[in-house]
Image (cartoon, grey):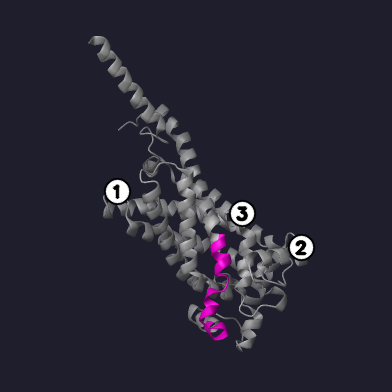
Amino acid sequence: MELCSDRAVAALDMSQNKSKDEEPFNSDGEYESLPPHVSVMTHMTAGAVAGILEHTVMYPVDSVKTRMQSLQPDPNAQYKSVYEALKRIIRTEGIFRPLRGLNITMIGAGPAHALYFACYERVKRSLSDVIQSGGNSHLANGVAGSVATVLHDAVMNPAEVIKQRMQMYNSPYRGLWDCIRTITYNEGVGAFYRSYSTQLTMNIPFQAVHFITYELMQEQLNPHRHYHPGSHILSGAAAGAVSAAVTTPLDVCKTLLNTQENIALSSMNVSGHLTGMANAVRTVYQLGGLSAFFKGVQARVIYQMPSTAIAWSVYEFFKYFLTKQQLPQEHEAGPRPL
């Protein structure tokens, strides 16, 4: 009997050890319990890396989207599909033309996404503690995403203006600094924030839908919230596609305000510069009707799906990696004195 008892205990120990090994990140450092253990710098570092990769990997498609949203494009810049557009741009303007404006995007994306993810994590946890006693709250996710967007866009808006000016067909700017100098001299510093209210009007619902969709997908695919790359990629792609599609009309208005498309504005007898969300909506409708609000929707969804998947998978990986590096240091340091 004693031998049988020993075997039973041994089998139970092996079973427990096996179940612990199968956990992606066990109770010594729960993956989703990051905020109490990890500094804000961890979230900022992970967010910065994720943001830069998100904007750079699919950047050529973003260039195509900007051109396809042109309300009165040059005959040489009218495209039927994303693939056809990329092929023609490379053939007629050079292989590096779809990457024009990438430098300012990288400069802006790092700090913008560092603030974005750090703010999201902090606000989400604070609100979830109040609303759901620490559990997942879709309201908290949406509000956190919206608050984080205000900080993100404050940093990213000037970069967006410069980027889109340089992406347009027959862009008159020789390079990054020429674009900055010319806009500042001709239109003033305020030109870099002319579309900020429109950007927020678009991005707050975009990010609210984005985070709610991501968290909903995670509840289905990854209910225990372990580090699981496949679930982060699929959830990110779905979140990007849905949020991009529903906010395309606002993105068209933002592009018009950023680029101040000369041909379109001249045809509407707009003198000076177009400002304000209401004026942008009116101009888009008068030039192309309701269908104009969905110009470039294909390119926008194609861009956002992999970009958002990359951003979430990279962010979750760095969060996981940096946490695993930090937890052993905390264990070695021992408990803090009271």
Camera sees residue 44 = no
**In the current view of this chain or complex, which residue is farthest to the left?**
1
Residue 301 inside the magenta-drawn segment: yes
**Label 3 vs 2, first from the N-terminus:** 3
Query: Horizontal and vertical percent for residue 215?
Result: 39, 53
Distance, label 1 to label 2, CA atoms, is: 53 Å
Element carrying mark 3: helix
Residue behind mark 2:
94
Front tag of 3 and 1 = 3
Distance, label 3 to label 2, CA atoms, is: 19 Å
**Label 3 vs 1, first from the N-terminus:** 3
Residue behind mark 3:
57
Query: Horizontal and vertical percent for residue 286?
Result: 54, 86
Residue behind mark 1:
134
Q: Residue at x 65, y 59 (%)?
A: 102
| Quarter location, residue 259 | bottom right
Q: Amino acid at mark 1?
A: Gly
First to last magenta residue range: 285-303
Q: Main SS of the magenta segment?
A: helix
Distance, label 3 to label 1, CA atoms, is: 35 Å
Disc 3 residue crowd, few under 14, some 14–19, many 20+, Cα 10 Å: few
Residue 88 as seen in the image, left or right of residue 4? right
